[in-house]
Amino acid sequence: MISIHFPSDPLGVLVYIIGLVILWVVASVPVYFSGKVVKGGRANFGDAMGATLGGVVVYYIVFFIVAIALGSVIGPSANAIGLVLGFLAWLAVFRGSFHTSWLGAVGIAMLAWIILLVIDFILVALFGNVKFPDFFPF
């Protein structure tokens, strides 16, 4: 069973919100660099931040709507359909944010994951396997 823990005091909520904003900025860095590569230098950090936030929001909205709407009709396979449609919606946000084609959006997403993996390897090499405190609401 997954338990969700949200802070209950104002300071905890403030720290939680600041942490989410920092996480959003950090997650936007690989998207920014991949957008620069795919768009030939014509991407800015605002595009990356909009794509990162908008992509997550649209993905979860599409996933949950599909999973709830189709779940009672076709069962657990609705989750798989929701994942695919959610990913396509995420790519649509990347496509719109960076004014690129579908192939360009896929390229930005794939290159962002590769950049994130390289950054992860570098951080693990510098700091080792660090156990961060449970921050996410999952």
Image (tube, grey):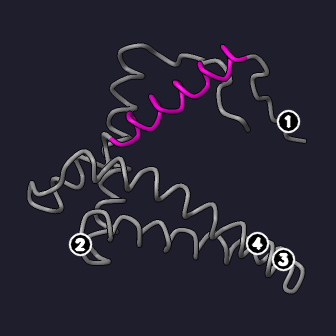
Question: How far apart are the alpha carbons under marks 2 and 4?
Answer: 29 Å
Res. 100 mark: 2
Q: Quadrant of the N terminus?
A: top right
Find disc 4 in the rendering and name its residue.
67
Indicate which disc, 3 or 1, sits on the residue closer to the N terminus. 1
Find disc 1 in the rendering and name its residue.
3
Find disc 3 in the rendering and name its residue.
71
- In the rendered image, residue 23 lying in the magenta stretch gets the answer yes
Question: How far apart are the alpha carbons under marks 4 and 3?
Answer: 5 Å
Indicate which disc, 2 or 3, sits on the residue closer to the N terminus. 3
Residue 80, how many percent across, how many down? 69, 73
Number of other residues with Cα within 10 Å of mark 4, as a class: few under 14, some 14 to 19, many 20 or more? many
Number of other residues with Cα within 10 Å of mark 2, as a class: few under 14, some 14 to 19, many 20 or more? some
Label 1: element kind: loop
Identify the amino acid type marked 2.
Answer: Thr
Question: How far apart are the alpha carbons under marks 3 and 1?
Answer: 23 Å
Question: How far apart are the alpha carbons under marks 1 and 4?
Answer: 21 Å
